Image (cartoon, rainbow, N blue to C red):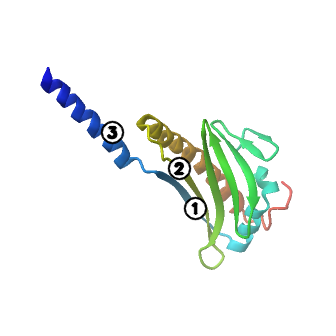
Amino acid sequence: MKYLKITASIVAIALFYLIYLFIPNKIVLTGNDYIPKSANELTKGIMEIQYWDRWMPYKKIESHTFIFEQGQMEVQEAFISSAKSKFILEDIVAPITLSAVDAGKDSSFLRYECLIDNHNFSPVKRIHTYLIAKKIQAQLDPILFAAKKYYSKPSTKDSTQTK
């Protein structure tokens, strides 16, 4: 019985350390996709956040918030070459930056980056945050695909055209 308690304690401590070893303090979600448009055209489309409803795969819109099957994305502001928003799923708020990067003559990469703070002492909370981050990534990838599909159209010279 004594050896069973010692073994159980060692296994519990090892599991505790493995959780902190393999689940990082900062979870970085990134994605990018090639688009056959110049970065200037793509940046203009990203900056005009009022037209995102033309390509965003949302279920419904409330003000500046796109609501999806899982979570919601609140569009905050557009800067010189990127747009900032935050994705909210359950109790996790994840800031997202969407930007266009030049990839040569008449081509660019559309990119998102999301940084989730995971400085939780509780191993259960740490695992929970990690699983939510994976769900957020599963929502961001279709958003990137929808943007690529919309901005890859040859007829889309600028995003202010009507559908």
Left or right of 34? Residue 49 is: right
User: Where is residue 9 drawn, in percent x and y?
Assistant: 24, 31
Which residue is denoted by mark 2 in the rendering?
A: 117
For the N terminus, the image quarter is top left
Query: Quick one: label 1 or label 3, which is nearer the N terminus?
Result: 3
Q: Are marks 3 and 2 in contact (CB under 8 Å)?
A: no
Dot 1: few (<14), some (14–19), or many (≥20) neighbours within 10 Å?
some
User: Where is residue 42 drawn, in percent x and y?
Assistant: 71, 67
Query: Quick one: label 2 or label 1, which is nearer the N terminus?
Result: 1
Which residue is denoted by mark 3 in the rendering?
A: 16
Residue type at mark 1: give it.
Asp
Which residue is denoted by mark 1 in the rendering?
A: 33
Query: Quick one: label 3 or label 2, which is nearer the N terminus?
Result: 3
Dot 3: few (<14), some (14–19), or many (≥20) neighbours within 10 Å?
some
Q: Residue at x 74, y 51 (%)?
A: 75
Q: Between tags 1 and 3, which lies in front?
A: 3
Label 2's element?
A: strand
Label 1's element?
A: strand
Q: Which mark is residue 151?
A: none
Q: Residue at x 65, y 67 (%)?
A: 100
Separation of marks 3 and 2 at Cα, in angstroms? 19 Å
Quarter location, residue 76: bottom right
